[in-house]
Amino acid sequence: MCQERLKKLVAGKHRIIFYFSIVILMIGSFFVWGENQSKLDRKTPAEISDYITEKMTDCYKNDNTNKCYKANAEDFINQFKISSITTVFNQNEKKSEFFKKCHLVAHYLGQAAYRKYGSIIAVFLQGNRACLGGVYHGAVEGYFMEQGITDIKSDKVKQLVSRVCGVPEDFDEPQKFTECNHGLGHATMLLTENDLPQALNLCDALSFRNEQELCYSGALMANADSFGGEDHPTKYIKADDPLYPCDILEQQQKRQCYIYGVLARFQNDLSKSISVCSIVPTEFQNDCFETIGRDRTMISADPAELKMQCGQIKKDEWRKDCISGSSYNLVIRFGAVSNIPIDYCDITETKYKNDCYMQIFRGLKRVTRKKEVIENFCGKITDGNYRNECLNSI
């Protein structure tokens, strides 16, 4: 009996020593991490901003290749905290040297940040939605890039896909859950080396339809981005068939293809986008024209320019869809602290104004859960009726 008690006591002491050692290691790691972090950002915020802007301008004026921007992203992550970098991008993304490549560079930043921090949540907590949340998308890509996956058809891959983004409550803002699932679609294209049907089928491992569709949108965007590329160019775009590959996809995948995938490569071509949406199946046309509106906010942040672009759509119903998409995405892109969405609705024609504001209110609930932030935003609306409706939507 005494021997048994002695064994248990010794075992208990060993466990205590073991756990104590783990705690000491964790504390030590924390201080090492803190010391390493203290070596970062020794420059002032202004100096960091100047450095990043200079590097982005250099790519913009002299090279403008993805290789240049990727090198920039890795350089920034090696020198500064992701929070400092994304703050600079958030402050400067409307400038020409940032704007058009902003989302792409943010993807590269997210990938590099995941390699640095080893945690999707850490990147999501320290980053922001600058450049339409590209840092979030890149973090999910980075996660899968580091998994060393060799068999994409294995059950392990489907399990990783099904749980990597968790549930909406895991994120401090609803939109971050959206960005995670969209980024997951980009990651499935990396895993499958741009085999779109296979990537979309991986998205089907998600439990809920809305999550699957968000994942589809990321895969379809990556499919368009890889068209004509040197590294695993997609086989699932035809230059002479703007609706391909929607007709060969599974039924549940067609909607995102017709309202998102067919437009992804024509973001810079408004007239082509309008003509494509005009020939998609009737049931998808309204959503397609709404996507045109969202795409306009990738080209410009100027309310007058956005109004002019949607104004080129002749059919009233489709023009309204374009305005709704623009107003919603201005909130998603610039958050609840920017006056741009309100300025846009203020200059919108009266018959479209209500739809414009309703989409703003919808977007607000995606970018923040903080009542005081929404109240402050609503207070900036000059029209009393819409200001009250905004406050009542909280």
Image: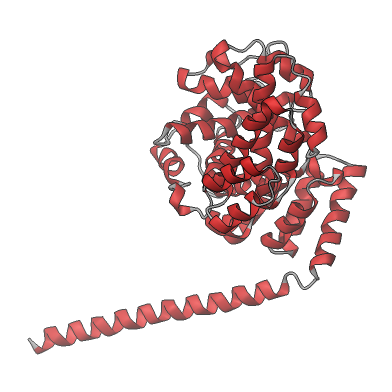
The x, y position of residue 32, in whole percent, is 60, 76
**Is residue 148 positioned above or below 191 on the image?**
below
196 displayed left or right of 75? left
Q: What percent of the width, then of the height, locates residue 148?
A: 53, 46
Tell me which colouring the rendered structure shows.
Answer: secondary structure
Image vertical order of residue 15 relative to residue 102, above or below: below
Furthest toward the left, the residue is 1
Quadrant the N terminus occupies = bottom left
Q: Nearer the viewer, residue 278 or 131?
A: 278
Question: In terms of image quadrants, where is residue 301?
Answer: top right
Describe residue 266's horizontal placement relative to residue 121 as left or right: right
The residue drawn where x is 84% and y is 50% is 56
Q: Residue at x 12, y 83 (%)?
A: 4
Q: Is residue 152 visible?
A: no
Question: Is residue 72 in view?
Answer: yes
Q: Quadrant of residue 241?
A: top right
Q: How many marks?
A: 0
Residue 190 vertical placement versus 36 (above, below): above
- Residue 138 vs residue 144, the one in the foreground: 138
Is residue 154 rendered to the left or right of residue 103? left
250 up-or-down from 32: above or below: above
Where residue 253 sits: x, y (%)? 50, 23
Q: Out of 114 and 126, give the one closest to the viewer.
A: 126
Taking the spot 63% from the left edge, 31% from the top edge, the residue there is: 354
Query: In the picture, residue 103 is in which quadrant?
Result: top right
**Name of the residue lying farthest toward the right:** 62
